[in-house]
Amino acid sequence: MIDITLLGTSALLPLPERALTAVVLSCAGRSILFDCGEGTQTAARKARVSLMKTDVIALTHYHGDHVFGLPGLMQTMGSMGRAEKLILTGPAGLQAAMEPVLRLAEFLPFPVEMLELPKDGVFLSRLAPGWPDRAFLRPVPTRHRVASQGYEFSLSRAGRFLPEKAQALGVPVVQWRQLQRGECVQVGENTVFPSQVMEAERTGLKFVFSGDTAPCAALEQAASGADLFICEATYGEDEQAPLAAEYGHMTFSQAGRTAARAQARRLWLAHFSQRMEDPEAYLPLAQAQFPLAECGRDGMRLSLHFLDE
């Protein structure tokens, strides 16, 4: 199961009812925080979400409305006695962008690692203990005015293990776990492959977060079949498409069209311009492209379950 909570839905400026960009994903008691705009801590408290077990803060880019909450959050983590390593990741320029943030946070009692993820992604269990073996995080190149990336989180599922087949092949019980992890084992002179004792992979879960971006093929591809796709929709009206293109953003229609082309299962719109008083007024424009589109709200939460749970 994956829990996703949308903490902030505003762009550029925080509003009384809309904090700046932040999304937290929790799985097996561990968390990833996507972006950390001003007011993220307050938004998390309102949503009754703890950020103290955050292993990775995944930044989409380094504009202030996506990172200004970082120094305060890290100081709070330190004051709460955190000793575990915190990983900060983001697009090119991470080290230089985070140096002033770390100076502001100063005297942290826990290590901070800055890591630019490989383009093919990484299993989270290699970064921090406690993550399921198949939890995977991949950066998605996006189109903004500066270096930027979205993120694809997936939790795949192996097929069911067939103990009777393992027994027939003479695999000792102590080696079954290796096969379940996708590893081959040696039994005498024979190599036993996982495919010999496992059913086909079962349907997993996928979550995609766009960050700030204009429409782009890489994001559309990443969102293919996503159980939840959170996509920026900075501008409401179709007539604002040239303005959106100039600043590297999307309109409601463009976000809906991206989700439709990707055949995502669910779409939440976010990152609304501070000039947009009522995002719901523009929702029909997105729903004309993708009927299941919803306007994100601060504190909005969804639990994703495997199909056969």
Image (cartoon, helix red, strand yellow):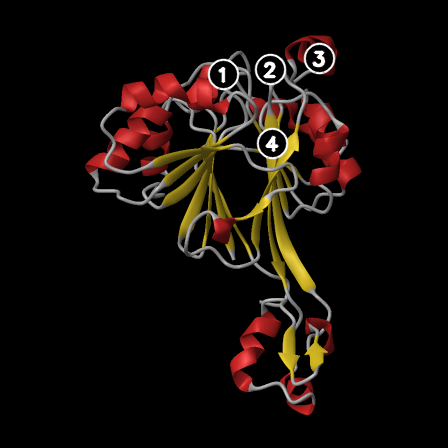
52 or 229, nearer to the observer: 52
Crowding at dot 1, Cα within 10 Å, few <14 / some 14-19 / many 20+, comes out as: some
Left or right of residue 68, residue 304 in this image = right
Q: On the image, numbered disc 2 is attached to which residue? A: 146
Q: Are marks 3 and 4 in contact (CB under 8 Å)?
A: no
- Where residue 5 sits in the image (x, y, percent)? 47, 41
Given the image, on which type of amino acid does mark 2 rest? Val
Q: Is residue 132 above or below residue 123?
A: below
Q: Is residue 64 above or below residue 178?
A: above
Q: Label 4's element?
A: strand
- Where residue 73 sits in the image (x, y, percent)? 31, 30
Q: Which of marks 1 and 4 is nearer the N terminus?
A: 1
In which quarter of the view is residue 295 placed? Answer: top right
Q: Which residue is drawn at 73% across and 69% down?
A: 200
- Where residue 162 sits in the image (x, y, percent)? 66, 82
Q: On the image, numbered disc 1 is attached to which residue? A: 63
Q: Do the residues labelled 2 and 1 touch (CB within 8 Å)?
A: yes
Q: Residue 150 carries which label?
A: 4
Q: On the image, numbered disc 3 is attached to which residue? A: 245
Given the image, on which type of amino acid does mark 3 rest? Ala
- Where residue 155 sits in the image (x, y, percent)? 59, 54
In what quadrant of the picture does the C terminus appear? Answer: bottom right
What is the CA distance from the residue labelled 3 to the residue labelled 1?
17 Å
Q: Earlier in the sequence, mark 3 or mark 4?
A: 4
Left or right of residue 133, residue 166 in this image = right
Q: In this view, does 157 lie above or below 9?
A: below
Given the image, on which type of amino acid does mark 4 rest? Gly
